[in-house]
């Protein structure tokens, strides 16, 4: 992690809504990052779901140094290293295995491993990691699940992602074990295609206000 961004104690405390973004053009990633930052969300999770994702991470890291850029949908040890080498400042995975946990830890970057069951939460805690991503949040029980595990597993803190909406985000954020939520609604495809960056900034402002 670059020293420029050691201004937070936890990945879960940087922004109330972590934008989860799928990019198809590298240049869009830079504009999206700037639009989100202008709205008060200086962090972006670029998912490794498209061929340009690693180049987009590198572009944002270079062109928008004030934005914390991370790699999402990390599913293999190789991707963890590739994301690190591209300039990612944090990693997010949809699930977690011992091998993947080890690979993400070896990068030296902060990371949020994905969990969907109590046993997976315990396995991540046993690995020494207390912060994790609940995915897919709504399909895995959502707020009811998180509320239920808060008492028996108080050490675990979450970023629920998957099915969280602008309407439900505040209810998630009200839970004691939720630090932030992952939001894909901030960069809808039609706005990106139209290069409607001001509209994305408006969505970011609404999400930032949830914090």
Image (tube, helix red, strand yellow):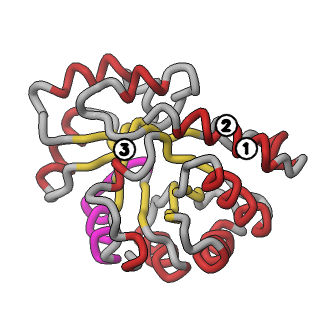
Q: Secondary structure at mark 3?
A: strand
Q: Is residue 174 above or below residue 117?
A: above
Q: Is residue 64 above or below residue 137?
A: below
Look at mark 1 in the image and give the residue it sits on: 200
Look at mark 2 in the image and give the residue it sits on: 203
Q: Secondary structure at mark 2?
A: helix
Q: Quadrant of the N terminus?
A: bottom left
Q: Residue at x 61, y 39 (%)?
A: 205
Percent coordinates x, y for residue 43 in the rendering = 52, 57
Residue contact at pointers 2 and 1, CB within 8 angstroms: yes
Residue 147 or residue 209, whichever sits in front: 209
Residue contact at pointers 1 and 3, CB within 8 angstroms: no
Asked whether 95 falls inside the magenta stretch, the response is yes
- The secondary structure that most of the magenta stretch takes on is helix
In three-dimensional space, the C-alpha distance between marks 3 and 2, rounded to whole angstroms, equals 22 Å
Residue 108 or residue 31, whichever sits in front: 31
Local crowd at mark 3 within 10 Å, few (<14), some, or many (≥20)? many
């Amino acid at each position: 992690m670059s020293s420029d961004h050691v201004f937070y104690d936890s990945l879960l405390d940087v922004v109330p809504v972590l934008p989860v973004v799928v990019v198809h053009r590298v240049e869009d990633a830079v504009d999206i990052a700037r639009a989100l930052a202008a709205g008060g969300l200086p962090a972006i999770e670029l998912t490794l779901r498209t061929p340009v994702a690693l180049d987009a991470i590198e572009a944002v890291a270079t062109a928008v140094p004030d934005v914390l850029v991370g790699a999402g949908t990390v599913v293999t040890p190789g991707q963890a290293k590739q994301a690190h080498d591209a300039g990612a400042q944090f990693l997010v995975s949809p699930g977690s295995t011992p091998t993947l946990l080890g690979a993400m830890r070896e990068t030296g970057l902060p990371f949020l491993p994905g969990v969907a069951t109590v046993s997976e939460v315990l396995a991540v805690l046993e690995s020494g990691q207390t912060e994790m991503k609940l995915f897919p949040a709504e399909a895995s029980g959502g707020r009811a699940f998180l509320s239920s595990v808060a008492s028996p597993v108080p050490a675990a803190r979450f970023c629920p992602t998957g099915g969280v909406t602008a309407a439900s985000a505040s209810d998630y954020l009200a839970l004691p074990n939720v630090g932030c939520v992952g939001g894909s609604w901030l960069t809808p495809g039609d706005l990106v295609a139209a290069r409607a960056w001001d509209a994305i900034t408006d969505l970011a402002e609404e999400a930032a206000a949830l914090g």
